[in-house]
Each structure stands twice: as C-alpha cells, then as structure tokens.
Amino acid sequence: MITINPTIRRTHKVVFIAIIALALYAPAKDALDIISRHFSKQTIQIVDVSFGSNMPWQEKSTSFLKVSNNAQSTLSRSQVIYTKLRLSNPTAEVKTYRRIWLNFTHDNGDQEYTTDYTLYNTETRQRLIGQSVELGPNSSIDIIAAYRFIPSYKNKSPISMSVSWEGQSLLRDKACEYNLHNASNTRFHYQCD
C-alpha cells in the first residue's frame, strides 16, 4: 500500500481550494455587478444654491454658494433660486430627468414646490432648451437650474428643501431633504451622501 505524505496531502487541498476560489471569483464578481446595476438608480443631488435674483456666475466671488445667514427669512419673499444640480446615472441605460422641481417643507408639515424653471449649462452658461435632460449610461453632469419661487404661505419660511423629478415612469423620484437652518455654513452636497 502506498502512503501519501500528510504535507503533500495538505498542499493538494490548498491548491484545490485555491483553484476553486479562482474559478468562482469571476462569476461571483459578475453576479454582484449585475445585482448592483439592477438596484442602482438615477439620482439628482443639490450641490449648491444661490438665493436671490443674481445669477451665480455674475458674482465676482469664486464661491457658488450665496446663502444669507438666515436663508429661511429670504424664502418668505418671491425670488429666483439658482441651484447647481448633479445628475447621476449609474445604470447601463439612457435615463431622462423630466419636471425637475424644488420642494419645500415647513415645520408644520405644509409643502410647496416650484415648477417654473430654466436650465443652464454650467460650463458655457448657455440656456438649455426644454425642461428635461437625457443622460447617457454610467455618467453624471452638473447643470444649473433657475427656479422662480413664489411663497405660498404668508410670513412662513420652509425648514427644508429637496429636489424631485419624473424618471422613466410617471411617479416622482425624490432626493433627500436639505436642511435650511444651517445652509449658510455648510455645503449642500455634503448633507446627503
């Protein structure tokens, strides 16, 4: 009878396990990629906001964010709100963002939103035609949206703001809520990662 040295037997087991692990690595990685693509979806993120009537690129300052120390009090009057939005499409399909609205929530739960807006290219500052953006697969783009805001509630200012849009279906998708209490000392895009 032939006996196999136990160290050789362990070596064969280790090599066999390594071969199986290598053989399963690629299919497991592909399965995880497919699952993550299936659950990933298009998003819009508010990067910065400029409350007031001047376009942010007309300002001499290099900072885009022009929020007063009390952003809530400025939202109690009519104005143009310029937002820098980051549209992201992590999927493998072309996605369309339609009817991109700003939503405002008051402390008692009342809601109001803006539907009157114009889109601008952030690099060329040219006005974009239409009110929807089509974004290719696995890409993102920054745009500027100028919203005409007319408060619905007298002497009340909202406490939070979000952006919502229509995607492929007619149901509205919504990004996270951005707190307006501390808007003057923080960047919006760090609030909701």
Image (tube, grey):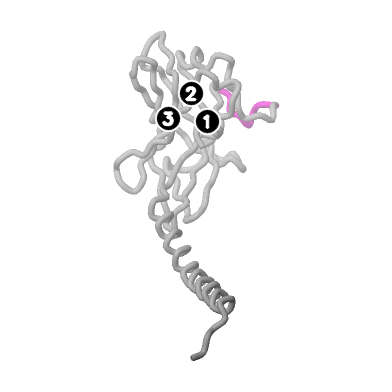
In the rendered image, the vertical position of residue 93 relative to residue 160, given as above or below: below
Residue drawn 39% across and 22% down?
105
Which x, y percent locates residue 109?
Answer: 34, 19
Which x, y percent locates residue 118?
Answer: 47, 35
Residue located beneath label 2 in the image: 179
Is residue 146 covered in magenta?
no
Residues tagged 3 and 1 counted as in contact (Cβ below 8 A): no
Residue type at tag 2: Asn
Residue type at tag 1: Gln
Residues tagged 2 and 1 counted as in contact (Cβ below 8 A): yes
In the rendered image, the vertical position of residue 143 relative to residue 11, given as above or below: above
In this picture, which residue range is highlighted in magenta? 53-60
The answer to which quarter of the image holds residue 54 is top right
Residue drawn 64% across and 29% down?
58
In the rendered image, the vertical position of residue 147 relative to residue 19, given as above or below: above
Q: CA distance from mark 3 to mark 1?
A: 16 Å
Element carrying mark 1: loop
Viewer-closest of 54 and 36 = 36
Q: Main secondary structure of the magenta part?
A: loop
Counting residues from the start of the chain, the first of labels 2 and 1 encountered is 2
Residue located beneath label 3 in the image: 102
Element carrying mark 2: strand
